[in-house]
Image (tube, rainbow, N blue to C red):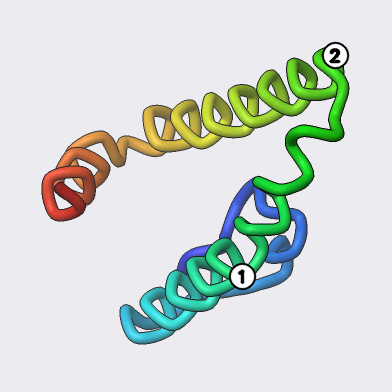
Amino acid sequence: MKVIPFIPECEDVVIDTLSEQQQLRQSVEAVHENIKPALMQNLESRSKDDLIQSYCNEMDAKNRAYYFILESGLINEFYQFCQNQA
């Protein structure tokens, strides 16, 4: 059983099976694809300071995920995941 960390929308989601993991991933990917065009159009209207803040927030979120991977001893699994994504 795995709990999804660091994703506010998923903080109460518990994943029991590989199939559920795949379904969650597909759902998240679909959301990203649906909102990406609107986000890209919105970039031109945002201030430089706002863009920098968003970049820093994204970097912090990724670092938290990396820390979780390292602290949980999942570095080999993460490496395999990255290899499969290439």
The x and y percentages for residue 14 are 58, 74
* Residue 51 image-quadrant placement: top right
Q: Amino acid at mark 1?
A: Asn
Q: Look at the picture and state if 38 lies above or below 65.
A: below
* Residue 25 image-quadrant placement: bottom left
Q: Amino acid at mark 2?
A: Asp
The x and y percentages for residue 55 are 67, 23
- For the residue labelled by badge 1, is the local secondary structure a helix, a strand or a loop? helix
Q: Circle 2 is placed at which residue position?
A: 49
Q: Name the disc covering residue 85, or none.
A: none
How far, Cα to Cα, is label 1 from label 2? 26 Å
Q: How many numbered circles are shown?
A: 2
- In depth, the one of 36 and 9 nearer the eye is 36
The x and y percentages for residue 24 are 50, 75
Q: Circle 1 is placed at which residue position?
A: 34
Say few, some or many: other residues with alpha carbon within 10 Å of mark 2 (under 14 / 14 to 19 / 20 or more): few
Residue at horizontal 62 percent and vertical 33 percent from the top: 61
- For the residue labelled by badge 2, is the local secondary structure a helix, a strand or a loop? helix
Residue at horizontal 41 percent and vertical 74 percent from the top: 21
Say few, some or many: other residues with alpha carbon within 10 Å of mark 1 (under 14 / 14 to 19 / 20 or more): few
- In depth, the one of 9 and 15 nearer the eye is 9
